[in-house]
Image (cartoon, grey):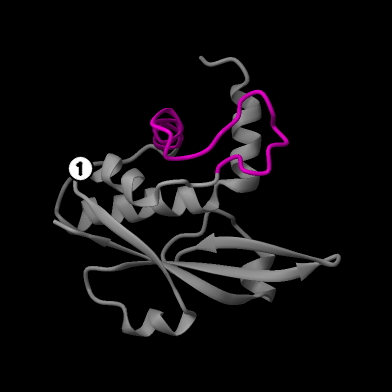
Amino acid sequence: MKPGIQTLFAEAGEAACYAFDLVDVAQEWHERHGLSVVLDPCQSLQKGIDLKRIHYNPDDENDENNFFVDAPALFLQDLTGVPWEVWKAEPDYEGRAQADEYVILRSERVSTGKTVGHFWRRRFNSLRHSLCVERGKIVSLRVCRPLA
């Protein structure tokens, strides 16, 4: 077991929502293709960190960039074996998304004078109850499309 694993999990609970949603996109892609692959979220996050797709500074749990997904398309490729493109879109694109596109939503709300955000999917939310989703508004999307 890696030293500091509890710190990593605590930080993931605070900031890894986008990474978890990308794991869910990869899982859904496997399901749509009839593949009996079950992606372990912890192993998937560690893979993303090891391959430098996800920023993580083990020496600074206060690093504001911890769990920032630097390369979402490459992270999806690592999890599925096929190339992807990922782009930011306006909220109204969700209704026009193509059948081969996977949508991640970004909701935000103001909390004590600062903006708080959370990424989630219609089929999956890494938080049981997200005030950003329940009381905030959808401000943007991330659209993921496999290229093969």
User: Circle 1 is placed at which residue position?
Assistant: 81
Q: Is residue 101 rendered to the left or right of residue 88?
A: left
* Residue visible at 33% across and 51% down in the picture: 73
Point out residue 71 in the picture as x, y percentages from the top left corner.
Answer: 40, 47
* Residue visible at 34% across and 56% down in the picture: 25
Q: Quadrant of the C terminus?
A: bottom left
56 in magenta: yes
Q: Residues within 10 Å of mark 1 (few under 14, many from 20)?
A: few
**Above-or-below relation of 142 to 15:** below
Say which quarter of the image contains residue 104. Answer: bottom left
Q: Which residues are magenta?
A: 42-67
Q: Nearer the viewer, residue 19 or 66?
A: 66
* Residue visible at 39% across and 50% down in the picture: 72
* Residue visible at 18% across and 58% down in the picture: 147
134 in magenta: no
**Above-or-below relation of 76 to 112:** above
Point out residue 60 in the picture as x, y percentages from the top left corner.
Answer: 69, 28
Point out residue 92 in the picture as x, y percentages from the top left corner.
Answer: 44, 85
Q: Nearer the viewer, residue 67 or 17?
A: 67
Q: How many marks?
A: 1
Q: Is residue 15 rendered to the left or right of residue 42?
A: right
Which SS class for mark 1?
loop
Q: Nearer the viewer, residue 17 or 68?
A: 68
Overall secondary structure of the magenta section: loop
**Above-or-below relation of 96 to 124:** below
Q: Amino acid at mark 1?
A: Gly
